[in-house]
Image (cartoon, rainbow, N blue to C red):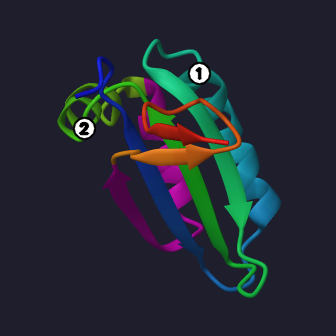
């Protein structure tokens, strides 16, 4: 068992057609600026789907369990305004939680490392 428990969150957002993608990002940037200073935050990456430009995926790594993240991070006050505003742009939002088990090229997770 690893000394540090980690969760990887894949947050998938499907924007409404013809949404202002820049306004969507501008709304969430302050949230990510604050979130990135949380003690259990490791990193986050934003992805845009090449084949579906209205699909945005956030990849986040946290040094905590899914249960801890849901209990302690998801409900923080600084998230509520951006979450409410983001809903105006969205058809749906989906969160999936994973545990890192292996990685190549970096050493940011607790998974087994390969060269």
Q: Residue at x 55, y 56 (%)?
A: 86
Residue 34 position within the rendered picture, expressed as x and y whole percent measured from the top left: 59, 21
Bin the neighbour count of mark 2 within 10 Å (Cα to Cα): few under 14, some 14-19, many 20 and up: few
Res 115 visible: yes
Is there CB contact under 8 Å for labels 1 and 2? no
User: Is residue 92 found inside the magenta-colored segment of the image?
Assistant: yes
**Residue 82 in view:** no
Indicate the position of residue 16 as horizontal and vertical percent values. 61, 80
Q: In the depicted view, which residue is nearer to us: 87 or 39?
A: 39
- For numbered disc 1, what is the local secondary structure? helix
Which residue lies under the disc numbered 1? Answer: 34
Over which residues does the magenta segment extend? Answer: 78-98
Element assignment for label 2: helix
Q: Nearer the viewer, residue 50 or 81?
A: 50
Q: Earlier in the sequence, mark 1 or mark 2?
A: 1
* Up-down relation of residue 52 to residue 108 (above or below): below
Q: Residue at x 42, y 38 (%)?
A: 80
Task: Say which residue appears at 39% left-offset and 46% top-offset.
Answer: 101
User: Residue 11: x and y, percent?
Assistant: 48, 57
Residue 40 included in the magenta stretch of the image? no
Q: Nearer the viewer, residue 88 or 105?
A: 105
Instruction: Look at mark 2 in the image and give the residue it sits on.
Output: 70
Quarter of the image for the N terminus: give it: top left
Q: Which mark is residue 53?
A: none
Instruction: Tell me: residue 64, above or below residue 92.
Output: above
């Amino acid at each position: 068992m690893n000394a540090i428990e980690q969760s990887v969150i894949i947050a998938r957002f499907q924007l409404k057609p013809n949404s202002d993608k820049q306004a969507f990002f501008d709304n969430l940037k302050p949230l990510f600026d604050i979130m990135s200073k949380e003690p259990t935050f490791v990193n986050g990456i934003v992805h845009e789907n090449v084949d579906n430009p209205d699909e945005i995926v956030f990849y986040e790594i946290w040094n905590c369990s899914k249960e801890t993240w849901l209990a302690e991070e998801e409900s923080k006050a600084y998230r509520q305004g951006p979450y409410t505003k983001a809903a105006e742009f969205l058809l749906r939002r989906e969160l999936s939680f994973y545990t890192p088990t292996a990685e190549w090229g970096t050493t940011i997770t607790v998974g087994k490392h390969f060269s």
